[in-house]
Amino acid sequence: MNRIQFFHSIRHTRAWIVRITFVLTVLFGAFTQTAGSGGEIVSAASPPASTVPAGSPPRTFIRRLGGGASAPVAMQPRIGQPIRLKIPSINVDAAIEKVGQTPDGAMDVPKDYNNTAWYDLGTRPGAPGNAVVDGHVDSATGKAVFWDLRKLVSGDQIVVVGDDGVERPFIVTASEAYSRANVPLDRVFGSTIETHLNLITCDPSTAFDHTRGEYAGNLVVYARAAS
């Protein structure tokens, strides 16, 4: 080996020593930066330690109320929309229309005199509350769907068929006649935890107002869900 080759070899070796020293310095610096204050070694690839105190409950999207673990809530079965009304004792088997309110705030009536109508802003028959169905008592050509409603007595059965195919029976508890101004709206439409069905029609035993095209009184049949 000549002198030029010898010095070249030394320079080459020194370069590798410098590189190795640099790498060790970097690694050692990274190692010391990741050492904990108590001397424990913390992995540089570890996620930050949680700031949640030990024993704290996990964070969830659903907030639990009441402190303890809650029991599962049973899903209530869907109550079908009423589509048919049956009253065997007076031979009624009629379709049910959906109605809301008239412009003056009263419950609307069915378009077809042979149909009944359910107040769809209220409770569905079979659900807790007051479900209300009305129907005409007569028309210009004769009797209508609720002509014989006044013949119902306590204990008679009413059946509402839902669009879910379920027949929901009710038992008549009372039949009351009122002047139009004195219909107890809270009893008929108000809230209750019980399951009620109330049927409304005109009272043909009262005077007929030809100007307004209506009778002076109403008949309301009250029923409850059969147990």
Image (cartoon, helix red, strand yellow):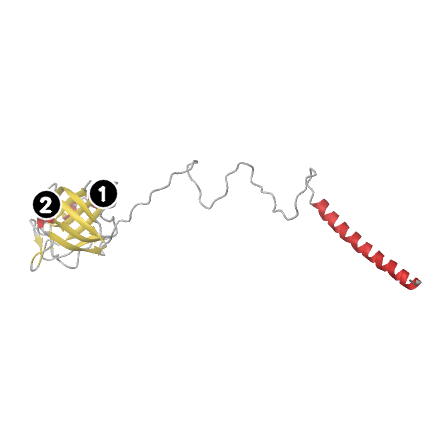
Q: Is residue 69 left or right of residue 172?
A: right
Dot 2: few (<14), some (14–19), or many (≥20) neighbours within 10 Å? some
Q: Is residue 23 left or right of residue 164?
A: right
* Quadrant that contains the N terminus: bottom right
Report the number of numbered marks.
Answer: 2
Tell me the number on the disc at residue 152: 2
Tell me the number on the disc at residue 195: 1
Residue 83 in the image: state x and y as whole percent.
20, 54
Mark 2 or 1 closer to N-term? Answer: 2
Residue 90 in the image: state x and y as whole percent.
9, 49
Q: Residue at x 22, y 43 (%)?
A: 195
Dot 1: few (<14), some (14–19), or many (≥20) neighbours within 10 Å? some
Q: Amino acid at mark 2?
A: Leu
Q: Residue at x 14, y 55 (%)?
A: 94
Q: Is residue 28 above or below residue 142?
A: above
Q: Residue at x 71, y 46 (%)?
A: 31
* Quadrant that contains the C terminus: top left
Q: Give the secondary structure at mark 2.
A: loop
Q: Amino acid at mark 1?
A: Thr
Question: Disc 2 to disc 1, how far (Cα)?
Answer: 19 Å
